[in-house]
Image (cartoon, rainbow, N blue to C red):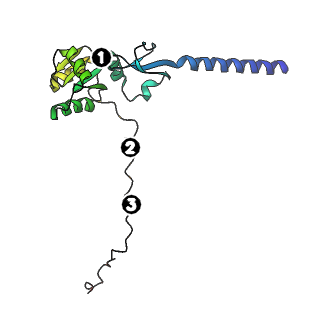
Amino acid sequence: MTFANNRAASIFALIALVAATAATAQMQQVYRYVDPEGRVVYSDKPPPPNAREAQAKRIGKNTIETSDMSFSAAMAQERFPVTLYTFGCGTVCDTASSMLNKRGVPHTVVDVGQSDGADKLKRLTGGLDAPVLQVGDQYATGYNENRWQNLLSDAGYPKTPAPRTTPVGRAPAPAPTPEPSTATQAVSPPAKGGYPQ
């Protein structure tokens, strides 16, 4: 009996060790950082020394199911990151930003009204005309919805955002009913047959 109990305990310990090892193997180290160009990078390689806002994260195997983005959007973002160069140019810039948001494209916004943003735009296009959409190493100067949509589609971004799996927010709380103050007078509804005098 003692031998059987020891053997069962050994088998149980071995199963627990294998399960713990498998769970650890499924966890993966991922790094998030901002590169010198201002782009957010996710990688399984440690960030370079000149990276800013470096964070180490451990993820499990079900990251696609829990991600806000679809798999195709995540792959497109990894291969062809999107940058919108813009400034307070009114309707044109607002429409350009809105198009990216409606399509659900994750993107970085560079304000060319700031000196560092203007420098980045000048290095990319040689000029200071905005808005500019950069998808990977391709770019389009000036807002042209068809051209921008084609750049995004060619890079593999989905045409519509992934469906929401969580509610956007709570229903607004009902407004509190004000208590009558001493300055207000209550009025009764009219009695049958007429109004009060």
* Residue name at image x 30 percent, y 17 percent: 80
Residue labelled with disc 2: 169
Residue 80, numbered circle? 1
Image coordinates of residue 136 in percent, x first then y, are 27, 15
The answer to whether residue 178 is left or right of residue 139 is right
* Mark 1 and mark 2: Cα distance apart in space: 31 Å
Q: Quadrant of residue 37?
A: top left
Label 3 vs 2, first from the N-terminus: 2
Image coordinates of residue 164 in percent, x first then y, are 36, 35
Label 1 vs 3, first from the N-terminus: 1
* Mark 1 and mark 3: Cα distance apart in space: 50 Å
The answer to whether residue 17 is left or right of residue 121 is right
Nearest to the observer: residue 108 or residue 23: 108
- Quarter of the image with the C terminus is bottom left
Residue closest to the far front? 115
Q: Three-letter amino acid code at disc 2?
A: Gly
Residue labelled with disc 3: 176
Secondary element at tag 3: loop
* Residue name at image x 30 percent, y 25 percent: 107
* Residue name at image x 40 percent, y 14 percent: 50
Secondary element at tag 1: loop
Evaluate if marks 1 and 3 touch, with contact meaning CB atoms under 8 Å apart. no
Secondary element at tag 2: loop
Q: Three-letter amino acid code at disc 1?
A: Phe
Q: Three-letter amino acid code at disc 3?
A: Pro
* Residue name at image x 74 percent, y 18 percent: 10
Q: Badge 2: few (under 14), some or many (20 or more) residues near its Cα, within 10 Å?
A: few
Q: Nearer the viewer, mark 3 or mark 2?
A: 3
Image coordinates of residue 105 in percent, x first then y, are 29, 26
- Quarter of the image with the N terminus is top right
Image coordinates of residue 84 in percent, x first then y, are 24, 24
